[in-house]
Image (cartoon, rainbow, N blue to C red):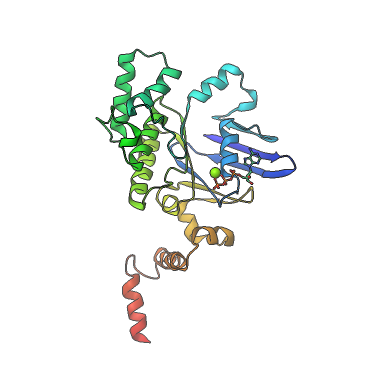
Amino acid sequence: MIEIKNIKKSFGDKTILEDISGVLETGKCNLIIGSSGSGKTVLTKCIVGLFKPDQGEICYDGKSMLDMNREERTELRQQIGMLFQGSALFDSMTVEQNILFTLDMFSDMSIRDKKKRVDEVLEKVELQGSNKKFPSEVSGGMKKRVGIARAIVLNPKYLFCDEPNSGLDPQTSLVIDKLIKQITTDYNITTIVVTHDMNSVMEIGDKIMYLYNGRKEWEGSKEDIIFSKNERLNEFIFASEFLQGAKAIRMLEVEGKIQEGTALQEAEKLLKEE
Ligand SMILES: Nc1ncnc2c1ncn2[C@@H]1O[C@H](COP(=O)(O)OP(=O)(O)OP(=O)(O)O)[C@@H](O)[C@H]1O
Ligand SMILES: [Mg+2]
């Protein structure tokens, strides 16, 4: 569990984050959403310790980063896996070498054990046998999976994914989302996903924090989104009229006013009555 307590961050005289608090839960996919420039990346960097907040603190499983000594910080850094935007693989290295790189940096395993571990994580992301391929030889979705394999190779307790679906088609995005979700539950880790992708929100959003202009505007689950009356959130999530209609239908279903999956028939009935 990660606790964010009253985080404030400015650059010069520009306030970027204004008093943000929240809890990122273990075993769940915690989403940080919001429009471009709302502060998602700055907040994430504060959480992982790449930026120092002006005020407030971040606690990892009850321990404030402010109270950690050098060794504890190094230890924490090794417990954090990161899937970077655009996967950030080394093009001149094979899939295996990309993953080995992290192990070489942070573990003292034997080369045999390292290779075994690479095979394990590749299997986890369903890329077994792709060890010798170069990033240029695999698809965008596969690159993301290699990125995920690399992010989990050290058995992290915390997994950060920045825009894991950028540049992917909706179906491949879904595969990646499901993989992130599965890893989160299988390993019972605290996962943080920064996303613009509304499909992801509705697919894996156990807990969602919506940022608006550097403030936490709303927090809840994907189910809560359906019923939320927060106008800014609704405008952001259900940006198109089509999605607004879909939300209205889902509300009717959940409230039991129409039977699930019968919206089309109900609409036809109404049209006939007219
Ligand atoms: N290192 C920096 N120095 C100064 N200003 C910064 C810095 N990093 C970010 N900002 C500013 O902070 C604000 C929030 O940026 P941030 O990158 O967190 O947005 P975001 O929500 O991640 O947007 P996007 O969805 O486009 O990635 C922006 O106005 C940005 O210009
Ligand atoms: Mg960003």
Residue lying at the far left in this picture: please name it. 129
Residue 124 location (% of width, % of height):
31, 33
Nearer to the camera, 9 or 90: 90
- Above or below for 156 versus 181: above
Query: Along the horizontal axis of the image, is 126 left or right of 216?
Result: left
Residue lying at the far right in this picture: please name it. 13
Number of numbered discs overlaid on the protein picture: 0
Residue 188 location (% of width, % of height):
41, 33
Residue 141 location (% of width, % of height):
34, 42
Nearer to the camera, 248 or 147: 147
Which residue is found at the position 70% from the left and 44% from the top? Answer: 15
Q: Quadrant of residue 256?
A: bottom left
Residue 56 location (% of width, % of height):
67, 35
Which residue is found at the position 37% from the left and 70% from the top? Answer: 258
- Above or below for 137 versus 131: below
Query: Along the horizontal axis of the image, is 8 left or right of 77?
Result: right
